[in-house]
Image (spheres, rainbow, N blue to C red):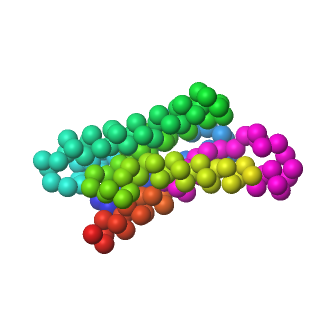
């Protein structure tokens, strides 16, 4: 499931990045696809007696992805509901027990995507002289960070 899950996760996030870049909208089915990938990961990772534990880690990953962006959207604005749901559903798929260094992977994905997003905003400001409040899609940045995080988890699982 590791390689297959990585490829599915990557395909969904790359497709979402393209759709969000073109339309500034994240379709609802994307969240369901990421939740399905997370459920397959829950049921295929580890022995059967740890399914409940894996599910709890995934729910925690969903909360860790959802809550910070939800609060950021409430306080600062500019974060759409699709972005918040994308972070939550990707957090569900990324959370993996037993990875103390990378757990929760969602933190790394959110931090990386925010850094990439802010870099993009700064680039627009410097390059075009436009205001920094230029609307930008968040999914491409989240996709880059999320795919990188999943890839690091895959490598970590392979070498340990």
As drawn, which residue projects farthest toward the left? 49
Q: Where is residue 39 in the image (x, y as percent from the top left)?
A: 30, 44
Q: Which residue is drawn at 27% across and 55% down?
A: 98
- On the question of residue 3 being in view, the answer is no
How far across and down, in percent of the image, does residue 99 sit? Answer: 31, 57
Residue, far bottom: 159
Residue 88: percent from the left, percent from the top? Answer: 44, 39
Picture residue at 32% right of the left edge, 61% below the top: 2
The residue drawn where x is 49% and y is 51% is 109
The answer to which quarter of the image holds residue 47 is bottom left
- Pick the front one: 7 or 147: 147
| Image quarter of the N terminus | bottom left
Q: Where is residue 13 in the image (x, y as percent from the top left)?
A: 51, 51
Residue at the image point whose x is 31% and y is 72% from the top: 159
Does the segment drawn in magenta span residue 126?
A: yes
Magenta highlight range = 123-146
Q: Quadrant of residue 3?
A: bottom left
- Return the residue nearer the eye: 42 or 101: 101
């Amino acid at each position: 499931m590791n390689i297959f899950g990585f490829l599915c996760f990557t395909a969904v996030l790359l497709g979402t990045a393209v759709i969000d870049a073109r339309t500034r909208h994240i379709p609802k089915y994307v969240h369901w696809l990421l939740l399905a990938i997370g459920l397959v990961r829950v049921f295929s990772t580890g022995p059967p007696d740890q399914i409940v534990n894996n599910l709890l880690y995934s729910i925690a990953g969903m909360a860790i992805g959802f809550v910070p962006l939800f609060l950021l959207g409430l306080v600062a604005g500019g974060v759409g509901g699709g972005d918040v749901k994308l972070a939550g559903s990707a957090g569900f798929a990324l959370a993996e027990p037993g990875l103390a260094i990378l757990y929760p992977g969602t933190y790394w994905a959110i931090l990386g995507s925010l850094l990439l997003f802010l870099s993009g905003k700064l680039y627009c400001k410097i390059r075009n002289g436009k205001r920094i409040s230029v609307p930008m899609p968040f999914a491409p940045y989240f996709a880059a960070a999320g795919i990188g995080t999943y890839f690091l988890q895959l490598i970590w699982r392979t070498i340990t």
